[in-house]
Amino acid sequence: MRNTLDDPAILAARMREALGEGPVVALTGAGLSTDSGIPDYRGPDSPPRKPMTYQQFVGDAAFRRHYWARNHVGWRHMHRTLPNDGHRALAALEACGTLTGVITQNVDTLHDAAGSRRVIDLHGRYDRVICLACSEVISRERLADRLAALNPDFADGVPDVEIAPDADAVLASTEGFRVADCESCGGMLKPDIVYFGENVPKARVMEGYDLVDEAAALLVAGSSLTVFSGRRYVKRAVERGKPVVVLNRGTTRADDVATLTVDAGCSEVLTALAHAYTARSARVP
């Protein structure tokens, strides 16, 4: 049954009952970061989006130019975003020993900023760039300086834009934008983000499985679980008989297997959940 009550404390109490005493592992998606001003891909009020695929990026110089031009603008906005109460609640749950870690489908690094210690960045991180030829990894900030030098005043001349969840920005034209290559080998640079059509590195997948196997329950927060990269961990938990609680606005692809589904925003409910667990911990001698 999908729970849609308005009282976060009541919803949190039901979630706590379903999750048990823990340990719990969290799987998070874009819906967790909407309260930080980062839009999601598939929320009830999200506009249609068509993210660039890996094949488009590596196969067409025009696509790469278009991406880097948009990212050059969008990155600055993402860089200024801050964690919200949902991120802080998960960090608090980890600090009190209830949560063992976070598997996130987000690339915004806000779990780290909120104080979470064990985070698996399933789809990579927006603040890193990798060379597809020599595998050198550099910071996005370093690349920003190079792109700014190659394209002076480009970002400053762009009016207010719509920002996408992967630090992209919606721009009408990117003609004339100059793309930077790897300083070490001249190879193609790509954000250290798993694109649509690209596989999550196997070691990262297995690390996520280990977290699920170590936990007694799985909490999904802010994900519709449309893509298999995240949904595989729900499947793993269900196969091992572990309870799965899903907190998300709108339906998800795990509603039929979840122990409990809650149709609500993440920030208030996760804050109430953290209070429920920490209050219990304070009463235990």
Image (cartoon, rainbow, N blue to C red):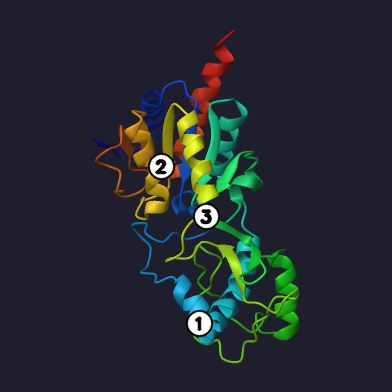
Gap in Å between the C-alphas at discs 1 and 2? 32 Å
Gap in Å between the C-alphas at discs 3 and 1? 24 Å
Q: Amino acid at mark 2?
A: Tyr
* Front of the two marks 3 and 1: 3
Q: Amino acid at mark 3?
A: Pro
Against 28, residue 138 (above or below) is: below
Report the number of discs.
Answer: 3
Numbered mark located on residue 63 in the image = 1
Let me know if residue 152 appears in the view.
no
Q: Amino acid at mark 1?
A: Phe
**Image x and y of residue 74, in percent:** 58, 70
Query: Which quadrant holds the N terminus?
Result: top left
Badge 2: residue crowd in 10 Å (few <14, some 14–19, many ≥20)? many
The residue wearing badge 2 is: 233
Q: Quadrant of residue 150?
A: bottom right
Against 234, residue 182 (above or below) is: below
The residue wearing badge 3 is: 201
Residue at the image position 58 percent from the left and 56 percent from the top? 108
